Image (spheres, rainbow, N blue to C red):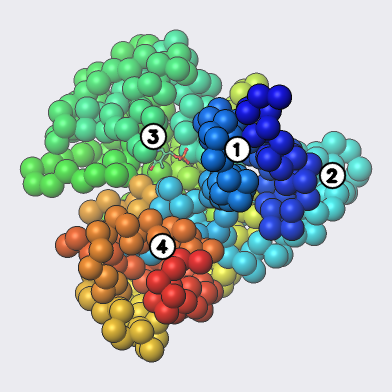
Amino acid sequence: MNSISKGFARIPQVEQLLQEPEFSSYIHKLSRPMVLDAIRKVLADVRRSGVLSEPDAQAESINRTIYQGIHQQCCRLLQKRHQKVINATGTIVHTNLGRSPIQPAVWEAVSQVNTGQSNLEIKLSDGKRGQRKGLVDNLLAKLTGADDALVVNNNASSVYLMLNELAAGKEVIVSRGEQIQIGGGFRIPDMLALSGAKLVEVGTTNITTTDDYLEAVTDNTAMVLMVHTSNFAIRGFTESPDINELSRKLPDHVLLAVDQGSGLTTERFAAEETPVSSYIKSGADLVCFSGDKIMGGPQAGIVCGKRKLVQQLEKNPLMRVLRPGRVVYSLLEELLVRKLNKQPEGMGLAERVTHHPETIRDRAMSLISGMEEHLELVESQMIVGGGALPDEHFPSWNLELNDARPAKTVLSELRAMPVPVIGVIRNNRVQLNIASVLPQDLGGLKEQLQSYFSTGNPV
Ligand SMILES: *Cc1c(COP(=O)(O)O)cnc(C)c1O
């Protein structure tokens, strides 16, 4: 027998490791096959490392390496799982943190529709096959003042569907100041190319006038597309056309479509942000926006506008590709009813927090209480985010952690907490912006911070 096979005998068996009580919670959260893979990988690594063939190899220390390795592997996988986090970034609708949280009351109200069977595509009046929109189109029409509306998976889909149905093979006029990229990979010129429409650029980065648009119109023009520049603002000498005037002056064969983006409807934040209803009122034929930014709903794209056009869009075979499922429809429906009734549960998070800096201060103070030596209250700002009001900062309060270690280390320890906390670095210190922390998470955040400061350990 050579020394290597002697060494192999010291390695615990796969099955024995899988039975270990200390790994059972991983099976619960990751599934048995995933944990099995992790165990096999760690054992293979140990075999490959050569420690087994070392003459003085200690079973105990090899075992320790194996157990630690399995814990590490499984923790790495657990961190990848979708899970609740605490948003202390001060960006209320944060694209990396799931954008709009859905109000618990709204979520609970649709639980039965989604955990049972539903009337998704049957008309209860006559038992015939129905459409999946339910009341969503009527509710959206009430909210925006449009004739009709439809829902797709996200707002990128809205833009794509409008262009593909109404402008493929034709020209679409877009201002040079609005040929933007939003987040990861959504570029207006790319969307146009993909949809089969031809981009006609007009104006300059800062100035585009009504005449610029009108002069670019040809017989082959299908649409003027105006895009809300949702993640930056151009300051100073700027001009964009009056929608009212533009819609009046455009010839009949040219549609006016607006990608409004944020989904601002009844909410009031800042005068500069134009709500969907204003565009409709000013004569836009179609306006599209996201359901999970300011509106506070699930991920969705909404197109509202003239009935004939909305119905035309719905007949496009792409609708079969882009349509959402009942989870989205039912959540939107519930949210919209509450929004139209002006109930607090119908408000998006951004609307609920931006005008109450004193509430945020109170929350910050109650978090500090008992942890004064570790936390300090500092003035700060919050932004709405998610492509809305890029230039608008609202007052907020931060808690600065009194920790001399490198800020990046502290930040990553916060992310390793049982409910990961996502903070920010300011002046080389870690800060928690309290504006974006959900009220229902304050208690849990405080407990985690208390145990972190008392043990010096995130868990
Ligand atoms: C956010 C945004 C989009 C993309 O919307 P998704 O819902 O992320 O697909 C498109 N256009 C504008 C103007 C936006 O603000």
- Disc 2 to disc 1, how far (Cα)? 56 Å
What's the residue type where badge 3 is placed?
A: Gly
Single out the residue that lies furthest toward the left: 237
Task: Mark 4 vs mark 3: give the one in front.
Answer: 4
The residue sitting at 17% across, 62% down in the picture is: 427
Residue count near mark 2 (Cα–Cα under 10 Å), binned few <14, some 14–19, many ≥20: some
- Disc 3 to disc 2, how far (Cα)? 40 Å
- Image coords of residue 393 (percent x, y): 24, 62
Q: Tell whether label 1 touches label 2 (CB within 8 Å).
A: no
On residue 184, the disc is 3
Task: Give the answer, above or below, for where 223 lies relative to 12.
Answer: above
Residue count near mark 1 (Cα–Cα under 10 Å), binned few <14, some 14–19, many ≥20: many
On residue 42, the disc is 1
Viewer can see residue 391: yes
Question: Callout 4: helix, strand or loop?
Answer: helix
Single out the residue that lies furthest toward the bottom: 370
- Disc 1 to disc 3, how far (Cα)? 35 Å
